[in-house]
Every structure is written in structure tokens, then in C-alpha cells.
Amino acid sequence: EVQLVQSGAEVKKPGDSLKISCKTSGYYFNKNWIGWVRQTPGKGLEWMGNIYPGDFDTMYSPSFQGRISVSVDKSTATVFLQWGSLRPSDTGVYYCARRSGSGGKSWSFDNWGRGTPVYVSS
Amino acid sequence: QSILTQPPSVSAAPGQKVTISCSGTRSNIGSYYVSWYQQFPGKPPRLVIFDNYYRPSGIPDRFSASKSGTSATLDISGLQTGDEADYFCGTWDNGLRDGVFGGGTKLTVL
């Protein structure tokens, strides 16, 4: 069974750094992209970026490029999402999700973590 | 404002059929496959349709979808109260170089 287990809720202050995690299991880690998706009441679902564990290739949404970093630890099949300096507008629920399909014209996420709530306030 | 346009809400009676639309452009729906997600409050999204019209294992055949040009639709027939949820469409946009989602449609089963 494919599982994506995310780290717990975070409460941070503006300017803080943060790294949240998504531990995967139940499939061959190297063979699927893993993405991060943010959900906020005002903006709905927003794709942030993906990483391909096989070769560490990354792709980022222009909306988040430069503010976040996605990385992997192959030894633990874990994917990370990191911020250097949080803003109140980063408040939301962050989901990791496995991208399904063979790429090309396919764009879907077939397994999702339960989400990591992040709250940023002074 | 989401790149893909969905109606904010739809409703229908149990047993009836409902259609949820998702409108885009040539650079997204017109060029890439569409996926659909079901989300209950406090839960993560669940994939119900991928590659325009395929159902993942475990999704009942009451869920079907299609795509034509720059629009896609999700149909849910034989509505059940357990289908009440938010539904999102998603795809890739090659012009924006970005993954994009619709704003979501809240389905109410009256």
C-alpha cells in the first residue's frame, strides 16, 4: 500500500525558517515524482513544485520559485519542503502527493499525504 | 482567481446525475490531460479521474469524465449523500510552466 506520512503542524513567526517532511513507502521511491500542493481558503489548491527522487530533478511553480526548496533523502524515502524566511501569507495546509502516470501530457497525483498545517503569525 | 474555471457550487437530488465543468485555455486543458479530485472537509484530495477519463482503482463507475477542446467535465450519476464534497480539476499549463487547478466546486446532494 502506497503511503505518504507527513510531519506535524507548525506554528512559526514571520522570518522563521521551516522544513517539513513527507515519508513515503509502499512503492519504488525513485520512479515517481513527488509534488507539494498548498491549500488555503482564499486561493484553493496551488501546485508548488515537484522532485524526481531518481535523479534529484526539480521543477517549481513560478509563484513559489526562489522562496521554497524541495529535496529528498533517498535513504529514508523522504521528501522535504523548506522555506528560508516565512511570511504570514505562507499560512496554509501543505500536502505532498505522488505524481502518477508516465509524464508527457499526464498531470495527476494519485496518492496524497494528510497535510501539514502551517501557521505563520507574529 | 484560478486559471481553470469551475462553478462554485452544484446541487442535485439523490439518484440524479450532476455535471461539473472545468474551463481552460489551449495552453492547459487544450494541450494536456485533465485530472479530477474529490475532497471532504479536513481530508486530503483524492484522485477520481486521471488522463481525462480514466478512473483509478476503487473509484465507482458512477464517476465519469470527458474533455473537448479547452473544457472538461466530470459527471457523477446515481448521486449519493456520501458524494457531497468539493471537486477540483487540474492539469499542466505549458504557457505558464505551472501546474494549475480549478477553484473547486462544492457538490450538495439535496
Image (spheres, rainbow, N blue to C red):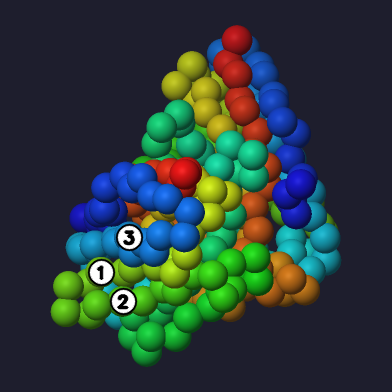
- The structure residue drawn at horizontal position 65% and vertical position 58%, both measured from the top left corner, is B100
Circles 2 and 1, Cβ within 8 Å, touching? The answer is yes
Residue B22 appears in the figure: yes
Judging from the image, what secondary structure is the residue with disc 2 in? strand
Residue B85, given in percent of the width and then of the height, sits at 52, 28
Residue B74 appears in the figure: no
In the image shown, does B57 or B44 lie closer to the viewer?
B44
Q: Which residue is mark 2?
A: A72
Residue B108, given in percent of the width and then of the height, sits at 60, 19
Give the chain of mark 3.
Answer: A
Viewer-nearest of labels 3 and 1? 3
In the image shown, does B75 or A104 lie closer to the viewer?
A104
Q: Which residue is mark 3?
A: A20
Q: Which residue is mark 1?
A: A78
Q: Residues within 10 Å of mark 1 (few under 14, many from 20)?
A: many
- Give me the C-alpha separation between circle 3 and circle 1: 10 Å
Quadrant into which the N terminus of chain A falls: bottom left
Amino acid carrying label 3: it is Ile
Q: Is residue B11 above or below residue A45?
A: above
* Labels 2 and 3: the sequence-earlier one: 3
